[in-house]
Amino acid sequence: MNSFIRRARLGRLASAASLEPALLVVTAAAVTAGGIAWLVGAGGLADLLWGLGTVSAVVPAVGWVWSALRHRHAGVDVIAVLALAGTLAVGEYLAGALIGLMLATGRTLEAAARRRASHDLRALLEHAPRSARRRTENGVRSVPLSEIAVGDLLVVGPGEVVPVDGTVESSAAVLDESVLTGEPLQAERPRGTGVRSGVVNAGRAFELRATATEQDSTYAGIVRLTRQAGAESAPVVRLADRYAAWFLPLSVAVAGLAWLISGSAVRAVAVLVVATPCPLLLAAPVAIVSGLSRASRLGVVVRDGGALENLGRSRTLLLDKTGTLTRGRPRVVDVTAAPGWTPSEVLRLAAAVDQYSPHVLARAITDTARERKLDLPIPADVTEEPGRGATGTVDGHRVAIGRADSGEARPAWAGAVDNRALLDGAAVAWLTVDGKPAGAVLLRDPLRHDAPRTLRHLRSAGIDRVLMLTGDRAEPAREVAAVLGLDDVRAELGPAEKVAAVRAERDRAVTVMVGDGVNDAPALAAADVGVAMGARGSTATSEAADIVLTTDRVDRLADAVTIAVRARRIAVQSALGGMLLSLAAMAAAAAGLLPPAVGALLQEGIDAAVILNALRALRVDRAMRPALTPDTEALIHRFAAEHDDLQDVLEAVRAAADRLSDAPGPQALATVEEAHRLLTERLLPHEDAEEHRLYPALAPALGGPEATATMSRAHAEIERLSHRVATHLHLAHVAGGLAPEQLDDLRSCLYGLNTVLRLHFTQEEESYFSLAP
């Protein structure tokens, strides 16, 4: 449940949080003690104890029913109250105590699930600034945020949150806008550019001219949106109550007819006793709580049973891009070297200077260099200009990595890098050595390896429509949508626009929204089911969500939907099956064949059967995820790490092809020879090990060797192209250089090899490596 109204209601009931367990203890003790008294021949004491157990259940049950009726909602507890009152009226105290025990058990199970709910916007409010530094003629003074007026000149220090909307008055500001946009890259905003409240100053202090007050600023609007969206969410109706809508009048009608025809009130009570919908009071909650338990073992925290029920009947999925479909952290996707340099040298020098930089791109470059086991020298005289990059001395050379000056003349290879960055939606960090361009590092937020498999499983679990809602630019968003086969993509959305999109989809079907940033919190609150990526996402998002994925794996969402669908199906089976048996017992009771006490015992047998069926929701669905042996998981992790190490080989192959296009001379030939050496010494042994170790280990879990046949064919193509490159090199050595007629084919081989390798790596990562936790 998302709404603040329902949160307030839960808060008012918090004082009675221990009522259900206490009632369970009392009714169980009454049934047990009465049974012992009856066995020793103390029938009067037994009736007294059972009667007390019945009365102890009647009082809170009447309160629950009254509260529901005040909200114009008659639920499953109405029949239980009628049955309890009837047993007291005709003196069938054992039957009443048994009904009280069943009622208490069902309510305790639901209370245990409901206590998971803790929806608030604590983190959102904690992130919001309380004061601002206002510049006046007398200096800079800290004042409460409520005193800020339009036109005030403010000072925002490094690491501080921008307090109100405004425009940059300094020469420039470097901002981390991920709180609002979800995008991990920092942005440079020049003088006069508008800035929204809630973003973080990632550079030097700057001056801000306020254009809005606290209440009219962007961040306050996000908090209001979340509250409004939550308040407008429809309350979750229990599965049991939905079935009770028709079972309740039917039971009352049968009991009334039995009394009218026979003239015996005992028969009417007997009908109500066996009509007490214990399959609804017990079986449905047991199945749902079992599903909650099963999900929690996979790192999926579901707030309450209603959220799991809604997830099980959801048909539309809305996804944020950054941190949900993508990793949420920039990664190096390619390294381009200028003539005379190699990609490894470029990455090594760039990472050496970036070792001490806190910039998100600098961390990505450094992490990639370390993953490739490059030896990073210690730089000297390192300086960093926010928004521009870092400079230092490495091995006696002055090295700079970061943004290039737009006015400088650019070599031809740099133009190709700009084109690739535009086509790939990548950011570029330029490397200069002693003032001369030496290379470039391309970075982007890569797709999660488990995203394609996750979406396939979600569709097979019943999700009919999948959309992306993102604050990112349209080009990279459409590329991700095309790769994943999404039904629609909506880019450059703010929090309010995301909420509007969620509301529109909710009008069509039960809707799930998945996100990980503060900017997603209003949309999560507006959805029928909000899912937060809690491992690295915002705490505010987790607090606004119904479901939190505690592991950084989006495939757990598919597991959660599968669990929810199965738990709900089992709950429905148990409830319907139990009600059919109850209907048969009602007919027997109406005919006078079942006295109330015997009917209560028969109902206990029905309960036991449906509860055992409901407990099937605890079992693991083997079809949900292939079972891997520990040895196979270890192999997957090994080859996944090797993929990271082999990225420089792929870059070397492409660089060799590029060099052939620029100047097909001796230097280009040397570059091709180096690429072939890397292929022979590192890549081909890796592919051979996958073919003969990883694929046979995966075959049993995937259903046989045919599952890896297409990947084996890719291995054969990689080896064929590598052999073709070797043949060209042999011909060049014999002829003393590359012949003109070789260039086109050799270039095609290298570009083709690079393309096949990247596609093959991606397919393995999505299909195989994503299987291992």
Image (cartoon, rainbow, N blue to C red):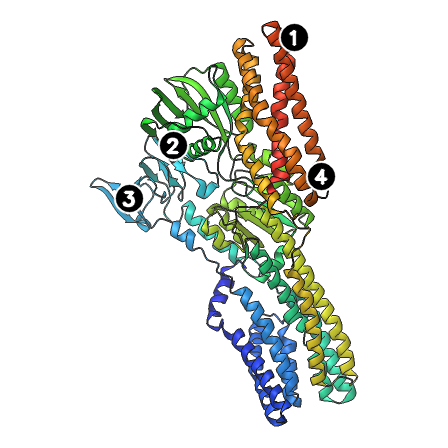
List the residue tagged with mark 1.
741
Return the disc, 3 or 4, that comes first in the chain's sequence.
3
Quadrant hosting residue 110: bottom right
User: Going from the N terminus, do you reach mark 1 or mark 4 first?
Assistant: 4
User: Mark 3 or mark 2: which is in front?
Assistant: 2
The amino acid type found where label 1 is placed reads Glu
Distance from disc 2 to disc 1, alpha carbons, whole Å, reads 46 Å
Query: CA–CA distance between discs 3 and 4?
Result: 63 Å
Nearer to us: label 1 or label 4: 4
Circle 4 — which element?
helix
Q: How far apart are marks 1 and 4 (CA)?
A: 40 Å
Q: Name the residue under label 3.
A: 133
Tell me the SS state at disc 3: strand
Residue contact at pointers 1 and 3, CB within 8 angstroms: no
**Compared with residue 79, is residue 448 higher up or lower down, i.e. above or below?**
above
Corner quadrant of residue 104: bottom right
Query: Residue at 63% across / 16% down in the picture?
Result: 726
Give the amino acid at mark 4: Ala
Dot 1 or dot 3, earlier in sequence: 3
Frontmost of labels 3 and 4 is 4
**Type of the residue with mark 2:** Gln
Mark 1 and 4 residues: CB-CB less than 8 Å, in contact? no
276 vs 564, nearest the viewer: 564
Residue 633 percent location from the top left of the image: 59, 44
| Residue under numbered circle 2 | 355
User: Considering depth in this image, is 706 or 273 the residue closer to the camera?
Assistant: 706
Give the percent coordinates (x, y) of residue 770.
60, 42
Q: Name the residue under label 4.
A: 707
- Cα distance in 3D space between marks 1 and 3: 70 Å
| Visible residue check, residue 744 | yes
Helix or strand or loop: what does disc 2 sit on? Answer: loop
